[in-house]
Structure formats: C-alpha cells, structure tokens
Amino acid sequence: MRIHRLSQALINKIAAGEVIERPASVVKELMENAVDAGATRIHVAVEAGGADLIRITDNGCGIVADELELALAAHATSKIQDADDLFRVGTLGFRGEALASIAEVSQLALRSRTAQQPEGAQIEAAGGRLSDVGPCGVPVGTTVEVRNLFFNMPVRRKGLRSATTELGHVKETFTRIALALPQIDFALTHNDRTVVDLSGTARWRDRISTFFGRELAENLIWVESTDGDVQLSGYVAHPSHSRANNRMQYFFLNCRYIRDRSLQHALGEAYRGLLLSGRWPIAFLNLAMPPEAVDVNVHPTKIEVRFHNAGQHYGQLLSTLRTKFLSTDLHVRVRGKSDDPTGAHDDDQAAQLREELVGWAKGKVAQWETDAAADEADVQGTFDMSGPAGLDERLEITQLDRAWAAAGGRRATIAPADRGGPVAEGSLGERGEMVQPVGAAAGSSPPRAVQVHDRYLVTESEDALVIFDQHALHERILYEQLRSRLAGSPLETQSLLVPEPVDLAPAEAAAVVEHRETLARLGMNVEPFGGDTVLISGYPAMLANLPPAEVLRELLEPLMTAGGEAARDALLDELLHTIACKAAVKAGDRLAPDEITALLAQRHLVEHAHHCPHGRPTALVFTREELDKRFKRS
Ligand code: ADP
Ligand code: MG
C-alpha cells in the first residue's frame, strides 16, 4: 500500500471515534456548547437512551446563518484564535471538532438564530454530507438534533448498550454539568417524560439537593479557602454519609467536571479514620483558578487536566478539610445512622474518634490504623477489653462469654455444620482454662479452640498451631454454601410488607434495572419506580438483619465495577462474595462456644483456599517444628 492522504470524512470519523463514544458523549459536547453560548436555559431531550434522538435546545447567543456550515466543519471554532489562547481557555470547548464529529456519525440538524437576525436558519447533515442552509422560524438560540447515532458505523451502533444503561450515562453527564452550573435552568426529558427539571439557583446546596436528596444536602459541610489565585470552595459530606465507591466525588475546575487522582487522594486522606474501610467520602468541590494555571488540552474529552501546581492544590484541599473538620462538631454523628442500623450511638466511641482526629491533625499521631480488621473492630466489643493484664486476663474470657449470653447473643448466627455431629458444649475447667474442647467433623478428634480479641480463632491441627480470621473463615464457608445452593434455585428472599423506594445515582439505577434478573436470583427483588428511584420488594433472607437499602447499595458496588463487561457468571460470583461478606460474623463479634464449633467444623473449606476473596489470608499456620525452634527446644 502506498502512502496517501486520508479524506476529510475519514479524518472526522477518526476524531469522532475519540470524542463520541456513546449518546452521553454527544450530550456532553452539545450541553457544553450551549453553556459556552451563554444560555440561561438548556433543555436536553433524548429518546431510546439517546440512540434514536438527542435534541438540545438553548437560549444562548445563536449562530449567524452564514456561519452554520462552518460550525459543522472540522477544526472550526469561535473560541480560540492562536496557540497562546490554548493556554488560557475560558470556555468549555475550544477544539472545534465536536459538531463535525457528531455530524459525521449521525443525522444532524442545526437550527439557530441570533438576537440580531429577524429569523433563524438551518442546516442538516447526514454522515458528514451537508445540506444547503435554509431559513426557519425559531426563537433566539440554538437547537441541535442528533438522530440515529452511529447509523453509518454498524459496529458502534451494535455496541450501544440497553436504552436504560445509555440513559444512565446521559443522566450522569447531565448531572455533572448541571451540578457545576447551578445558576442555569436545565431540563432533561426521556421519551417525552420529564426526568429532571431544574430552575437556576444561587444556592449550590439546593441543586445538590435536587439531585441527591434533602437528607444528604442537610449533611453537607461548606468549605472554602484561598491560596494565591486559587480558590477552593464547595461541600463535603459529614462522615455519617459515605458511599461504597468514589463516584459521588464531584470535582470541578472552573466549573468543568474533572477527574483527578491527586485531588481524590487528598480527599481520602482528609477523611482518614473518619470512615469505615471500604467507604468513600462524598464531595462537591470547585477549584477556581486563572486558566493559565492549568492545561486542559491533554485529553480529548478534557475530563483530565494537567495542573501546573498539582502539589499546591493537593495541599490546599487537604489542609482546608482538616482545619474545617477540627472546628466542626463531628461528635455523636460519627458512625452515624448509615453505619449503625439500630440508630444507637456510642458517645464514648465518637469522642475517642474525635480526640484521635485532633491528635492526628496536630501531628501527634503519625499513622492511623488503617487495616480493615481494625476498622471493623470497633463495631462492637473492642472497647470492653480493658481487663487487668497478666494471668487474670484468662478468666476474663469466661466473664465476657457470660456477658455475651446475657446480652442475648448477636446479630449473626452460624448454622451448625451439616456433618458436624452433635455439638459439644464448650466446657471450662475448674480453673477457668482458656482452651475449650469443641466438636469437629465426625471421625476426627475434636479440635480445641479459643477465640481471642473477638476476631481470631486459635486452634491446633495434628502438627501445627492454626489461627483463623473468624470473619474470613465464615465468609468463605457462607460463600461455598451459597454457591452450591444457587446451583439449584434462587436464594431465599425476605419479602418486604411495604416495598421500599431507594434513590440512586442515574448510572446506578440503570445498572440495577439492567441486572434485575441476576439480582433476583440472589433474592434481591427490585423494580424501576420512575426517575432514578427503584423499589425493593424483597432482599436476600440471609441479610434480613440489615436495612434493605443498605444491602442494595452493597450489591451496587460489584454491579457498577464489574457490571459493564464482566460475564454474567463472574458478576454473580462477585455478588455472592459481597453477600457472604456482609452476612459473615465480623471482627469484634463475640462468638458462643457452639458457634466456634460450627465454624471450625467446616474449616476444611478453607484448607485449600487460604485466602478470603479480598486477598487477605484466612488462616495462619505455625508448625510444631517452627514453634519448637522458636522456643529453642530443638
Ligand atoms: P468548539 O465548541 O470546540 O468551538 P464545536 O464543534 O463544538 O467546537 O462548535 C463549533 C462552533 O460552533 C463553536 O465554536 C461555536 O461558535 C458554534 N456553536 C456550537 N454550538 C453552539 C451553540 N449551542 N450556540 C452558539 N454557538 C454554537
Ligand atoms: Mg464544543
């Protein structure tokens, strides 16, 4: 093949491939154009998730008739003049390729009128072929109509996901832009039904509230600071409100939604110790800075940018939040409702956390305990472990066991092992020995075991000392049981007398609806309920002791991360792990003797898989040889 120049059409198609991935990308580009045009009202209408139609109408400055053709041409823009402008971009767009790209891969109609023109004009394009410009009656502003996206790129067209999923992406895009610009009226309709209708407001909190609910909006903390010519401002959520992923972290740069690892990291650092492990802070933050201080021309969709002083912004965010948290009363509500379904708060615990936070911020505590077990541990129990040191501590165990019995047991229960035979009662020697004999698989000699620190089970095998992580062991057992049960029929459902509505983020709602059947196999019954609300009518009976909405949110995590591409089986597996993890006893749960027995009776399940699904070891083994050596016996 000889080298030859590509046709403009092909060049445009290649550019379109970069910028236009799915309907949501079209929505993003067109909404940004409307914003750049100074519109105060922007209406987005889509049909079939945007695959059939996307129409965006604005009341901005409009385009004069004799520039309509140019607007659709590649590399044509009114937003920059020369190369220097590239480094002081004050508009959302500037590359001049969006309209050309979209026109290349769809059937597009552009109608526009400026305030100076008595009437409007229009132009059409299909697969890049432009029609003549003709007159049309329209109000001042611009309407861009995009039909049959990718009609001339069958592979891309086929690659589009269900209307619900695509609509989810459209909503997320819409949300990002509408969140950044609260003063503008925005509306979104799908198949002629209103999805969101927002009036402009001076209060950012109001806009956040319409998207994410009053409950969250009322738990936002305002932060602001100035460092040189950089202004940081916005809201972060109280630690009692968090998410199982980082998708509720909205960062804006000069009102442009961006993703930035460094800022995300600073946010995470600021919340260190305030959230349980696996939970992510919620934030809506804008950085305002002179356009020269950042390069936005590093990513085709500009979702990533390059700051000239990334370190400075990192420091500013972290110190602003730290300072704010110190002066904010995080008392009582630390470990609030969402983490504690009973609504009971441990004031001492909260006070201690606060004290730790103060200490840490003052630089006294160098390192927070971060491992998951430590974080989970204070759910209950840990703070009781204040017995006297030394020999007496052994007796403590019996006493705490009685306290456990008196308290009427705990949330999690462990079914006795199928093949465990009669369960032996934990018996204590006259001197209150710490080792309790417990039953084991029929035939083998019963292992002796003891629970320590409310999280480990110490026992022996024929030739070794074995320490199990009780949570990991139980999780593994439940997972295996669930998997074999699921091979037969769906998991048992706990039906709700009154179905519970749950508000989700747009993309989350779409994912739930799309994977409805998979969820139903797991006993989680959900239905769309209009907008981004879904209705829970039943949920896995195994998790009946948790609030249904929380269970759904837990399941959302694997759904959102694996949901897209993963094969159904892999996703199912992920979901099973999540259920097993949530249903398993936690570190910090005091176990009754027969529970220990039941757990250990199934330890063979982990013998070949020494790791829990999160990659942490389930069991540690110290051979007798090793012990002998350490004690200098050999
Ligand atoms: P860019 O936004 O990068 O300049 P586009 O291809 O998106 O490139 O748009 C090309 C030009 O068309 C813009 O520079 C602008 O002058 C004009 N334009 C596009 N959309 C609108 C709109 N909604 N209102 C007014 N002008 C618009
Ligand atoms: Mg543009």
Image: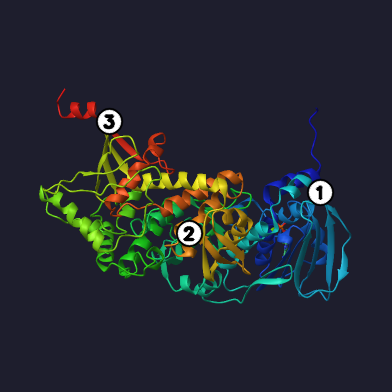
Q: CA distance from mark 3 to mark 2?
A: 38 Å
Image coords of residue 374 (percent x, y): 30, 51
Q: Would residue 125 be found to the left or right of residue 455 on screen?
A: right
Dot 2 crowding, Cα within 10 Å, few <14, some 14–19, many 20+: some
In this rendering, does residue 629 appear at all?
yes
The residue indicated by pointer 2 is 541
Q: Residue at x 41, y 42 (%)?
A: 612
The quarter of the picture where the C terminus appears is: top left
Name the secondary structure under disc 1.
loop
Query: What amino acid is found at the position of numbered circle 3 in the picture?
Result: Glu
Q: Would residue 10 be found to the left or right of residue 305 on screen?
A: right
Q: Residue at x 38, y 53 (%)?
A: 277
Q: Which mark is residue 462?
A: 3
Image coords of residue 295 (percent x, y): 55, 51
CB at mark 2 closer than 8 A to ligand 2?
A: no
Q: CA distance from mark 2 to mark 1?
A: 49 Å
Query: What amino acid is found at the position of numbered circle 2 in the picture?
Result: Ala
**455, 264: nearer the viewer:** 455
Query: What amino acid is found at the position of numbered circle 1 in the picture?
Result: Asn
Q: Which mark is residue 494?
A: none
Q: Nearer the viewer, mark 1 or mark 3?
A: 3
Dot 1 crowding, Cα within 10 Å, few <14, some 14–19, many 20+: some
Q: Sequence-wise, which precedes: disc 1 or disc 3?
A: 1
Q: Which mark is residue 152?
A: 1
